[in-house]
Image (tube, helix red, strand yellow):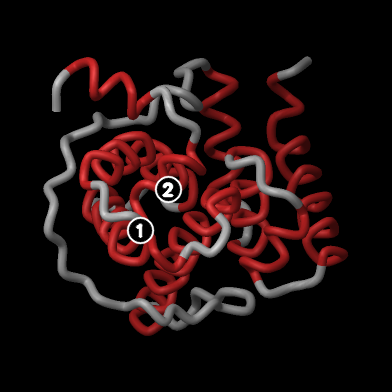
Amino acid sequence: MEKKQKDFYYSMSLPDLVRLCQQDDKFALETLIKRNEKIVYNTLYHLDPNRPDLSDLTQEVLFRMARSIKKVRNPDTFKYWLNQIITNLFYDELRRKTRKLPTVSIDEPISDQDSTSAATREIPDIGQVPEETILGSELDEKIKEAIQKLPEQFKIVIVLRELQGLSYDEIAKITKTSIGTVKSRLARARGKLQDHIRPYLQ
């Protein structure tokens, strides 16, 4: 892709880029993948940073995104739709882990209709740690540590709300719970995070 053409695609809004992807524009799809690969990795990292296959899971999410992009009815909701794919894959992996480790449990798993694991595109190495949200300070490390100690049902809502910026309604749909449940879990998650980092704020 020439630089001028590349700049044109990168300057487009996300909904417009999605619309071009739905018209089989391969350059638009390439740009959409590049613009979202670190976002996907960030989200998966915060959900389970100890997995050795985060790059593979990122590749799988992006493959599902590319394959199903025409199913997005409203391009303005692309971010919500992409987070559904990420969350579905995360719950899939938790279910696998649960079968191996019976002591691990999750709350209201979301089934995924789109379960192909083949991949057609290599995702470049994007480094050890996402740079936008992991700043390397002691407090950031303690926040990451606190998130990982949250029960899964609290962890998913805090990541979707605080890191991805989804609305209560969108989170409720993704987790298949009520808005009241989402708000309750967020409040409890934030309380647990505050308790964990309070000693570092004094």
Q: Nearer the viewer, residue 140 or 74?
A: 74
Three-letter amino acid code of the residue under disc 2: Val
- Pointer 1 residue: 65
Label 2: few (<14), some (14–19) or many (≥20) C-alpha neighbours in 10 Å: many
Counting residues from the start of the chain, the first of labels 2 and 1 encountered is 2
- Pointer 2 residue: 18
Q: Nearer the viewer, residue 158 or 161?
A: 161
- At which x and y percent is residue 10? 36, 26
Residue 177 falls left or right of residue 13: right
Three-letter amino acid code of the residue under disc 1: Met
Residue 163, by quadrant, is: top right
Residue 161 falls left or right of residue 188: left
- At which x and y percent is residue 64? 32, 63
Image depth: mark 2 or mark 1 in front: 2
Tell me: residue 80, above or below residue 127: below
Disc 1 is placed on an element classified as helix
Q: Residue at x 73, y 50 (%)?
A: 167
Give the position of the C terminus as an image quadrant: top right
Tell me: residue 32, above or below residue 98: above
Label 1: few (<14), some (14–19) or many (≥20) C-alpha neighbours in 10 Å: many
Q: Nearer the viewer, residue 79 or 38?
A: 79
Disc 2 is placed on an element classified as helix
Residue 22, by quadrant, is: bottom left
